[in-house]
Image: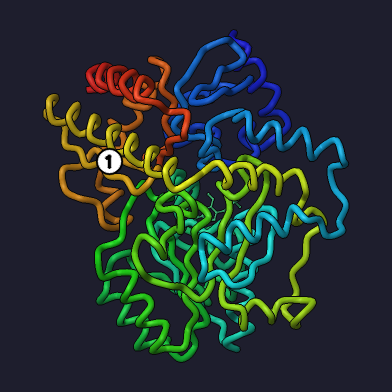
Amino acid sequence: MTRSAEIMQRARALFPGGVNSPVRAFGGVGGEPFVVERGEGARIWDVDGREYLDYVLSWGPLVLGHAAPVVLDALRDTMERGTSFGIPTELEVRLGECITQRMQHIEMLRFVSSGTEATMSALRLARAATGRSRVLKFDGCYHGHADAFLVRAGSGVATLGLPNSPGVPDAVASLTLTAPYNDLAALAAVATRHGNDLAAIIVEPVIGNAGFIPPDLGFLPALRQVADQTGALLIFDEVMTGFRIAPGGATERFGVTPDLVTLGKVIGGGLPVAAYGGRRDLMEQVAPTGPVYQAGTLSGNPLAMAGGLATLTALTPELHARIERRTASLVMGLREIAARRGVPFTADHAGSMFGFFFRAEPVRSFADAKQADVELFKRFFHAALERGVYLAPSAFEAGFLSAAHGDAEIAATIERLDEALGAAL
Ligand code: PLP
């Protein structure tokens, strides 16, 4: 028995599925997850000493790679002065300033500790500010596991084929409306029918939780227009796309400004940080300035703030552009491999986020994504893993690059994935 298998056996006695977040259990690809021991740069090593080039990067946060020296130095320095106070620190202000300078439509923000908290709180605020109850989300988008969002969700919910979650009362689920992503006719229909009761429209500006699905040219502007016409607030859930698809996120990349934004992942550099923010008049309604209650014992935790600040400080526009170029090379390489082997394939990227499907036609919605060859993906995933490339263990998750994925790593990855595809066919 490998050491990974032995540890997973103990884990399964303790945690549902042996994991503390569902997709980690490899349910989407079958087989047994490995147990990780350490990471450095673009690589991780499991407890049996096997090395992998990592394209999951803790599901997105590690834009500088594993154990980035600037992040570790900042953590060490901060840690020596104490790990948590529950009193304001300058680090919160510095990270807040760093974010608002790059995303100027975020006039005010609040730090929380997970993306789930961020989206849940943004929706509460939208409901309070509009005095309305309903929220519109899009099929395959994942916005964390708060009750309102576990309706036709992506990520693990999609991976495991779960439609909605038991435990979410019908009364709550019925307030969540859904429409297919990139479907303007469906959007118009919801606006006509429920516009008067719509508190918010929430969207992943580029979907990363149903695989990687970019918006059609007119989709995000149409959301802005419907929000304006109906009086609903537009929420960009940039937990995944923030500081990944452009230095200023979706607003910079697509020129559409939401009312509220949620952030997570990269802004913590691998520590638990997320945030919601946006228009000042809205954020001033949050307690203690306003009546909309939201709080957190560890919110703005100094270690987490230091991790995020070190990460964003290092992530200059030049570095962002370099990682984006390498992501483009990887995607190009993948397309070439598939074309040479005659495999139906589509792949794309935005910034340092990428994805692919075994399907000839472009994927514009979750329904399209489900038409892809998932069985081939499973075989490809395992063949890649055997060759030391760790892709997200689900056909419905995006991949990520870091600053540590250099040209040599990309070349090695393409070579190994070429072999892996050959083996998977
Ligand atoms: N929103 C999006 C777009 C996400 O990708 C995720 C997590 O993957 C979340 C929200 C939830 O974040 P967390 O897992 O930190 O609760």
Considering only vertical position in the picture, is 186 above or below 154? below
Q: Is residue 228 visible?
A: yes
Q: How is the image coloured?
A: rainbow
Q: Nearer the viewer, residue 59 or 29?
A: 59
In screen coordinates, is 62 left or right of 141?
Answer: right
> Which amino acid, mark 1?
Phe
In screen coordinates, is 361 left or right of 65?
Answer: left
Classify mark 1: helix, strand or loop: strand
Quadrant of the rendered image containing residue 125: bottom right
Considering only vertical position in the picture, is 174 above or below 53? below
- In this rendering, the count of numbered labels is 1
Quadrant of the rendered image containing residue 319: top left
Extreme residue in the bottom direction: 196
Rate crowding at label 1 as few (under 14), some (14 to 19) or many (20 or more) other CA atoms within 10 Å.
many
| Image quadrant in which the N terminus is located | top right
| Image quadrant in which the C terminus is located | top left
Q: Residue at x 70, y 22 (%)?
A: 10
Q: Residue at x 29, y 23 (%)?
A: 414
Considering only vertical position in the picture, is 8 above or below 371? above
Q: Residue at x 66, y 55 (%)?
A: 95
In screen coordinates, is 329 left or right of 70?
Answer: left
Which residue is labeled 1 in the image?
A: 357
Quadrant of the rendered image containing residue 171: bottom right
Instruction: Provide residue 233's location: percent of width, then percent of height.
Output: 50, 80
Disc 1 under 8 Å from ligand 1? The reply is no
Q: Is residue 167 visible?
A: no
Q: Residue at x 27, y 74 (%)?
A: 184
Considering only vertical position in the picture, is 355 above or below 291? above
Q: Nearer the viewer, residue 374 or 337?
A: 337
Instruction: Provide residue 99's location: percent of width, then percent of height.
Output: 58, 58
Instruction: Provide residue 66's location: percent of width, then percent of height.
Output: 57, 29
Instruction: Provide residue 141's location: percent of width, then percent of height.
Output: 43, 58
